[in-house]
Amino acid sequence: MILYDVANGIARITLNRSDKRNALNPELIDAIKDGLAKSARDPECRVVLLTGAGKDFCSGADLAGLKTAQAGVLDNMDDARNMAELFLAMRNHPHPIVAAVQGRALAGGCGLATACDIILASESAQFGYPEVNIGFVPAMVMAILRRSVSEKAAFELVATGDVISAMRAHELGLVHHVYPDDSFTDEVEAYASRLTNKSASAVMLSKRLLYQMDSMSFEAALEAGVQTNAIARMTEDCRRGVERFLGRQRS
């Protein structure tokens, strides 16, 4: 269901259902969760790179296996919760997760990209939440989408179901960087490599604190910042970084 390998600090998780445009079914979702858990435990991993095999990143849910009115509400909730658990695992992962999107990232596939910490897109990539066109709702991902773009932009995306270009997604703040198709692979590799050179402890603490602040009051967020600040000062990365900085000043 997925291809997994780690090299030079980058754990690559590749959705490997190219014959189905990498459509999400329970088995693929479970495989992605397993890959994330493996990368979180791997001491060599500094960055997770999520990609899709073939022409598309991910076309969304595999509708052939989607439970609908024929199933009971509890069965449908269990099925939906599997995806919610994946999004939570991505949010709680200790390392940055980078989506490299070529081709189409639609519906649940767009949700999967949105759940990543960073989205890199090829210029011909397409994004969208077309669930409304079949009477469905991109429900779980709204918790992430409304934190990624403005409320009005999020509503337009889910209410119209329009598929948008990579550049439009960048304008909305959904995508971080758009690269030419012919240099996309090299640009993604260079970006991920730059991330691996950053302090792993600082990036981990920053990611944890940023998302932890979602439901906090201003005062609670400041206090969480105080605690993280104190922890960061005690890391080996910080000690070495301060020594390097002071050494440059003295020279």
Image (spheres, rainbow, N blue to C red):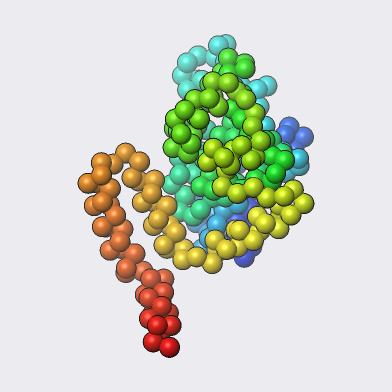
Query: Which residue appears farthest toward the bottom when viewing the image?
Result: 251
Q: Is residue 235 left or right of residue 158?
A: left
Residue 210: x and y, percent? 38, 49
Quadrant of residue 239 in the image? Answer: bottom left
Closer to the camera, 246 or 232?
A: 246
The quadrant the C terminus occupies is: bottom left
Q: Is residue 155 left or right of residue 58?
A: left
Is residue 239 depicted above or below 31 in this figure?
below
Quadrant of residue 33 in the image? Answer: top right
**Res. 63 visible in picture:** yes
- Residue at (55% x, 11% y) in the render: 69
- Residue at (57% x, 63% y) in the render: 194
Quadrant of residue 55 in the image? Answer: top right
Please give the count of numbered marks on the rendered protein. Answer: 0
The quadrant the N terminus occupies is: top right
Q: Is residue 85 left or right of residue 165?
A: left
Closer to the camera, 95 or 41?
A: 95
Is residue 64 depicted above or below 8 in this figure?
above
Closer to the camera, 93 or 152?
A: 152
- Residue at (76% x, 42% y) in the render: 54
Residue 3: x and y, percent? 68, 48
**Res. 15 visible in picture:** no
Residue 14: x and y, percent? 66, 47
Residue 182: x and y, percent? 77, 51
- Residue at (55% x, 27% y) in the render: 157
